[in-house]
Structures are given as structure tokens and as C-alpha cells.
Image (cartoon, rainbow, N blue to C red):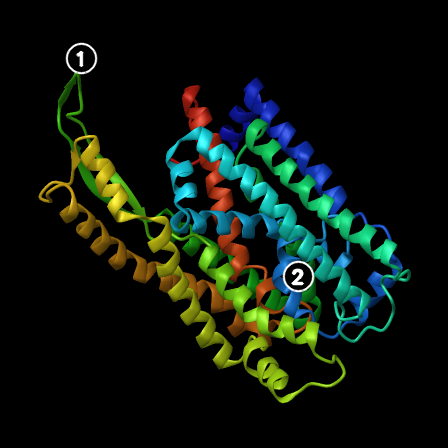
Amino acid sequence: MLSAFRSALATPDLRKKILFTLMIVAVYRVGAVTPAPGVSYPNVQACQAQAEDQNIFSLLNLFSGGALLQLSVFATGIMPYITASIIVQLLTVVIPRFEELKKEGQAGQGKLTQYTRYLTIGLAILQATGVVALADRNQLFVGCEVPVLPDDSVYSLALTVLTMTAGTAVMMWLGELITERGVGNGMSLLIFLNIAARIPEEGANILSSAGGLTFFFVCVLGLAIIASVVFVEQGQRRIPVQYAKRMVGRRMYGGTSTYLPIKVNQAGVIPVIFASSLLYLPDLLGQLIGDPNEASGWQQFIQTYLTDQSSWVHILLYFSMIIFFTYFYITITFNVDDRAEEMKKFGGFIPGIRPGRPTAEYLGFVLNRITLPGSIYLGIVAILPNFFLSMTGSQQGGGAQNFPFGGTAVLIMVGVALHTVKQIESQLMQRNYEGFLR
């Protein structure tokens, strides 16, 4: 692997892409620690030390690399773009116009990307307004009475919201620059960096609260989890596809054998994000519309059974929702009828299966069979940190979602790392170098 890295850096154009990506990463990290205008950074630091519990915002803080609870320029993080991308992707099934754009190729995809950008800005405004409102009401840092926004005038708050929204737009632009001129998918790399930036702090918390032996055990466990996730993420079912020979003009096409790969984890990390967001929503709404000093009966029920990540009700509900959203998302994104029609259009067929409707039914059967172990795998990885909360003392200030080697974090990091390494490897293979993965 070291020789492969040396070969990558020795290739001039690939070296430029890697250095350009690192430069964008440095610019991004500077923005992630730069406070937004109107924010008292010393008070924010004091509130972070005094806050009792940040579990409700741990997922958003994870995706922002800690920028959310620092109220920095990039406090809203990349979550508005992720949400907008998911919404546009789901709307392609509902809105016929979006489905037509998807089938138009690069031109249609460009228009969908533009719609995603507009929706991202709108969602960023809503999220930034919510963050500023919570910070102004002293509900972003529970248990802290120090004002993090000393000037609560309308002009100052509007300027803070505008700056955070502009920060999301800049993050989106930086991600697109990495995709076009750097290495890997820009948005995915930014999410990877946000999560990786939290690992040293979380590791230090475990070391100080649980001791060296537990820290060593967590590191060994983390390596085992990462190895298991890599193994499953690489797993796929290859359905053989045969293309018949056909004449186009004076040339003959087809007559080749290939395969249709169906991954064990076809849905990626999207079901985990959906389930986490829905579980956080009741508590978030309760904080926005309820009295922070008086907890009603339903608020106590939510905090006891839904917010408490060590509760068996929370664990079982979380696991069930992940399985449901895995089937839901795969059903929407992987249309077996369209795949069967494309194969029939280009003269392809599965040996032993007739083209058309029988092929679609066979693909649906295989997809349902392979989705079950994939959804169970996602659920186990996502709920695994909940069983180690008491051992590591991580109940406060982050909870299971910020556990360094489990749940959403390891799924995203492993997926992005594998995709980036494969992209560098493919460019090395074009130049007759050996890649990272042999």
C-alpha cells in the first residue's frame, strides 16, 4: 500500500488533485472553527463545559464536525444538502417531470442538481433560524444560563442566520470543487472529515472517564467493527447477464457476458439517518414549543423512552425503523421494472429467465432476499454503541451517536474511504500501477 501511495504522489496530475483536495480541506476546517458574527465565543466555550446533555443535537453536531455547538460559520453543516438530495431523489418517483429529467442523462441531471442547490439554501435558512432561536433561548446548551448571543436584536440575529446560510452555500461549493478537480466525492469527503474531527475528542473523553484499559478495549473493538463493516460493504450478489448478438449497420454488437451487482448494503447509511432524525424529532419539537423549566407528562415519556439511548424501547424502535426504511429506500431507488426494461432494450437477459416481466420478478425476489441481511446488519451496527454507553461513560455530551467506532460514524467513514481509495486505484490502474486493493 505504501508503494501505491508513492506511485499516486509521483503521478503529476494525480498529485495535483490530491494536493488540491487537501487545500480545500484546510480551508473548510478554518471555517468550521470560525465563530459566526454576534456569537460570544468565550460564553460558548463556558456553556460547552457546563452543559448537562447534548444528546438531542449529537447527530447534527456529528455531521458538522463539532461546528454546530461552537456556533461557527459552518454551524449548519452539510445536513441541508444531504436532506435536499434525499428529497429530490425521492421526488423523482412522485413527480413525472423529475423522472423525465433523470432519464435525459447529463443535461437532466444538471437541472436536478440545480434544484437540489435551491432546496439546500431553503433548508439551510430554516435550520440556521432554528439553531439561532435555540441559542437565543438558552436551549442549545441545556443547563447553561450564560448568553451565547449577547446582542439579541433582530438585526444581529438575522446577520447570524445569513452568515450560517452562506456557510452552507460555501460548503456546497467546496464539495463540488473537490468532485470536479480533486479526488473522490466532495460532499462525502466533507462528511468524512467532520466525523473524523470528532474522534480525538471522543477518544480523550473515554480515556479520561473510563481509564486506559477500557480505552484499549474500545480501540480493539473499533478495529473489529471497522473490519466487519468493510467485509459486508464489499459483499454483493452478482446476477449473470448475457447479451445477444445484434447487427447495427455493418457492425455486430453484443454476445458478451457480464453481471448485475446487487450489494448487501444497497441502501447505504440513508436508513440510519432517517431513523435517527425521526427519533430526535419529538424531543426537538418539545424543546421548541414547550417550557424548558417544566416537563409535561408526554415530554417525560419522550425523554425516558425515546431520547434515552440506553432504553430498550429506544433500541428496539430504532432497530425496527432502520429495517423499515431500508426496504422503503431500496424499493424507491432500485426500480426492478426499469432495470428489466433496460436489459430487454439492449438485448440482455438472465440465463434461464425470460426477458420482461419474469426478469423484473426475479430481480425483485433476489433484492428482497438480500435486503433482509443488509437491513439487519445496518441495525446491529447502528445500535451497537448503545450497549457500551455505561461502560465508556458516554451518556453525556454526545451519547451513542458520537461513539467513535459505531453507528452512523463508522458506516459513513468506511463507505467514503472505500469509494475514495477505489477512485484513486482506478486512476493508478490506468497508468499501469498497482492499486491499493489487490
- Residue for badge 1: 249
- On the image, the x and y values in percent for residue 48 come to 78, 65
Question: Residue at image x 42%, y 48%?
Answer: 95
Direction from residue 231 to residue 312 in the image, left or right: right
- On the image, the x and y values in percent for residue 212 come to 65, 66
- In this rendering, the label closer to the viewer, 1 or 2: 1
From what the image shows, is residue 141 above or below residue 420?
below
Direction from residue 308 to residue 425 in the image, left or right: left
Does label 1 or label 2 sit earlier along the sequence? 2
Question: Residue at image x 77%, y 60%?
Answer: 132
Q: Nearer the viewer, residue 392 or 217?
A: 392
Question: Residue at image x 80%, y 70%?
Answer: 138
Q: Residue furthest bottom?
A: 297
Direction from residue 159 to residue 63 in the image, left or right: left
| Residue density around tag 1, few if under 14, some if 14–19, many if 20 or more, within 10 Å | few
Going by the numbered disc 1, the residue's amino acid type is Gly
Which quadrant is the C terminus positioned in? top left
- On the image, the x and y values in percent for residue 280 come to 58, 69
- Residue for badge 2: 202
**Dot label at residue 38:** none
Question: Residue at image x 80%, y 47%?
Answer: 34
From what the image shows, is residue 123 above or below residue 45?
above
